[in-house]
Amino acid sequence: MAKKQDFASKTAKMAKHGKSCPVCGEIYSYVLAVDTVASKKEGAHRFAERQVAVCKCNEKEVYG
């Protein structure tokens, strides 16, 4: 049988192995940022996806 995993054990694991911000010391949470880009060839809009690391320092820049 598999071991039950709760939220507290997941956050403890991230604190142990996750990357932290050198400025504020908070552990990064990763979000998927989607931007619309106009295609030069077709004139249609495309979606560009990228993973962004967010902490207290840069959440205003990421979320707007």
Image: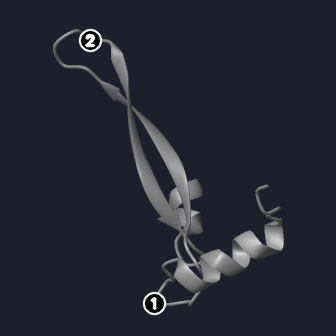
Spot occupied by residue 3 in the image (x, y as percentages of width and height): 78, 63
Residue 49 in the image: above or below residue 8: above
Q: Secondary structure at mark 2?
A: loop
Spot occupied by residue 25 in the image (x, y as percentages of width and height): 56, 90
- CA gap between label 2 and label 1 equals 42 Å
Q: Residues within 10 Å of mark 1 (few under 14, many from 20)?
A: few
Q: Residues within 10 Å of mark 2 (few under 14, many from 20)?
A: few
Which of the 4 image quarters holds residue 54? bottom right
Q: Amino acid at mark 1?
A: Pro
Q: Is residue 50 left or right of residue 43?
A: right
Question: Which residue in the protein does label 2 denote?
Answer: 43
Q: Residue at x 33, y 29 (%)?
A: 37
What numbered label is drawn on residue 22?
1
Q: Residue at x 76, y 57 (%)?
A: 2
Which of the 4 image quarters holds residue 8? bottom right
Q: Is residue 60 left or right of residue 44?
A: right
Considering every residue shown, the one lying at the far front of the view is 1
Q: Is residue 21 left or right of residue 14?
A: left
Which quarter of the image is occupied by the N terminus? bottom right
Residue 21 in the image: above or below residue 31: below
Which of the 4 image quarters holds residue 11? bottom right
